């Protein structure tokens, strides 16, 4: 018998997450602990519930720039080796608790040097935390694997250095690179040398594009920079036209994205907060999934958007009526689009995802 789809049953389903920011997913209680440890006095509240609410409300601003301002507090308490390791380990535990079996978690190493850490020290502290978290989860009989993406911030000029760092740590689960931060005024083409280097090294990268800025940003990310995936990419809907008979026509860029199976890392709750989509019912994920773009579902920032993978799927189930076969398709799409090896992706699809959904489908 088919298991009914609900938040609780979605939590049991194996899920794959490609777009989650380490500094956007801290537990409010850990932020308070870490702030006390380093005597950081600027948190808006030292009460766990109130602080959680503050992040969600402050990020609910309708603007990417204001959304990003809330990261000042999480970044401030992540300036030591121990803090980075703890935050990374807790991230793994929280994702595994939610039924995530593979996740690519990203962060910008350049933001964590205020306490004197070198870039390699930052990366090693986070990798230690991910491995600790994976071991803990395995000892509880659950399975999760974490790949890391290193981000360079668009507004800084350190992308070449961060790209080199990603390549240096590629054999210890740093699986790719990204650029993040404010989109308007910082086109991805400012980082061409980094992308050129990554391509020469056969390394993988995704680019935040088409979130706060439209089609030109997506076009540049793909055709100038060579991005393999798009972070968000929601504005690709601007290249769809509905004709008089109600048929949707794809413009050249949208057709390219669909034909080449370019993965869209869509983050519904985050998009509502930054104003990239007006409401969940009008979120482009509906039409893009109908048109069979390679859509994936992601959290972006679990703290700021007060969300989880299971919560995002529950929201989509309520809004668009998606059932297990749709959730499985999004999950397989994500696993196919991961930056780990083909054989490793296949293994997760065949041994974890397909059997998991077969059980739920009954
Ligand atoms: O949705 C986003 N768009 C652009 N940048 C973002 C988004 N969410 C988080 N960031 C930024 C803030 C973090 O400090 C940085 C690295 O994780 O990435
Ligand atoms: Zn993001």
Image: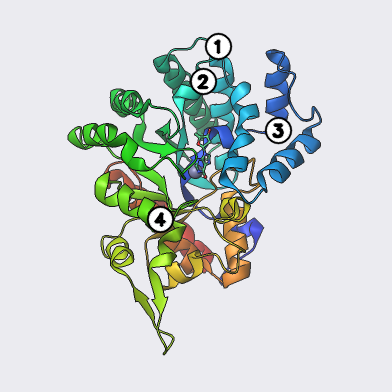
The count of marks equals 4
Q: Position of residue 315 (x, y in %)?
A: 62, 62
Left or right of 285 in this view: 33:
right
Task: Return the residue at label 4.
Answer: 264
Cα distance between the residues tagged 2 and 3: 19 Å
Q: Nearer the viewer, residue 349 or 25?
A: 25
Q: Which mark is residue 345?
A: none
Q: Residue at x 58, y 37 (%)?
A: 24
Crowd tier of the residue under label 2, counting other residues whose Cα lies within 10 Å: few below 14, some 14–19, many 20 or above: many
* Res. 72 in view: yes
Is residue 197 placed above or below 117 in the rendered structure? below
Colour option used: rainbow
- Please tell me whether mark 3 sits on a helix, a strand or a loop: helix
Q: Earlier in the sequence, mark 2 or mark 4?
A: 2
Q: Position of residue 195 (x, y in %)?
A: 27, 36
* Res. 350 in view: no
Q: Earlier in the sequence, mark 2 or mark 3?
A: 3
Task: Return the residue at label 1.
Answer: 115
Q: Position of residue 58 (x, y in %)?
A: 70, 42
Task: Return the residue at label 3.
Answer: 28
- Please tell me whether mark 2 sits on a helix, a strand or a loop: helix
Task: Return the residue at label 2.
Answer: 112
Q: Nearer the viewer, residue 191 or 208?
A: 191
- Please tell me whether mark 1 sits on a helix, a strand or a loop: loop
Cα distance between the residues tagged 2 and 4: 28 Å
Front tag of 2 and 3: 2
Q: Are marks 1 and 2 in contact (CB under 8 Å)?
A: yes
**Mark 4 Cβ and ligand 2 under 8 Å apart:** no
Q: Are marks 2 and 4 in contact (CB under 8 Å)?
A: no
Q: Position of residue 17 (x, y in %)?
A: 47, 47
Q: Residue at x 62, y 28 (%)?
A: 72
């Amino acid at each position: 018998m088919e298991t009914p789809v609900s938040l609780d049953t979605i939590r049991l389903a194996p899920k794959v997450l490609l777009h989650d920011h380490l500094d956007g997913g801290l537990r409010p209680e850990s932020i308070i602990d870490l702030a006390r440890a380093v005597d950081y006095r600027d948190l808006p509240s030292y009460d766990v519930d109130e602080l959680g609410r503050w992040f969600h409300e402050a990020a609910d601003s309708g603007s990417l720039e204001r959304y990003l301002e809330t990261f000042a507090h999480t970044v401030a308490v992540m300036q030591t080796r121990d803090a980075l390791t703890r935050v990374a380990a807790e991230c793994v535990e929280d994702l595994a608790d939610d039924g995530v079996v593979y996740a690519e978690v990203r962060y910008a190493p350049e933001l964590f040097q205020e306490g004197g850490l070198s870039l390699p020290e930052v990366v090693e502290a986070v990798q230690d935390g991910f491995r600790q978290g994976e071991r803990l989860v395995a000892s509880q009989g659950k399975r999760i694997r974490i790949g890391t993406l290193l981000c360079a911030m668009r507004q800084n000029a350190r992308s070449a250095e961060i790209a080199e760092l990603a390549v240096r740590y590629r054999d210890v689960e740093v699986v790719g690179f990204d650029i993040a931060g404010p989109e308007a005024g910082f086109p991805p083409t400012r980082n061409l040398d980094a992308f050129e280097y990554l391509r020469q090294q056969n390394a993988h990268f995704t680019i935040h594009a088409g979130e706060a800025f439209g089609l030109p940003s997506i076009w540049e990310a793909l055709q100038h920079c060579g991005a393999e995936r798009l972070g968000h990419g929601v504005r690709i809907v601007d290249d769809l036209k509905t004709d008089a008979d109600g048929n949707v026509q794809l413009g050249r860029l949208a057709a390219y994205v669909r034909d080449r199976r370019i993965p869209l890392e869509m983050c519904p709750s985050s998009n509502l907060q930054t104003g990239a989509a007006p409401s969940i019912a009008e979120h482009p994920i509906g039409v893009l999934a109908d048109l069979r773009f390679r859509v994936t579902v992601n959290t972006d920032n679990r703290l700021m958007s007060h969300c989880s993978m299971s919560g995002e799927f529950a929201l989509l189930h309520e809004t668009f009526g998606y059932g297990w076969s749709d959730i499985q398709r999004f999950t397989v799409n994500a696993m196919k689009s991961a930056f780990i090896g083909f054989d490793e992706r296949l293994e997760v699809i065949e041994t974890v995802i397909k059997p998991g959904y077969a059980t739920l489908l009954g």
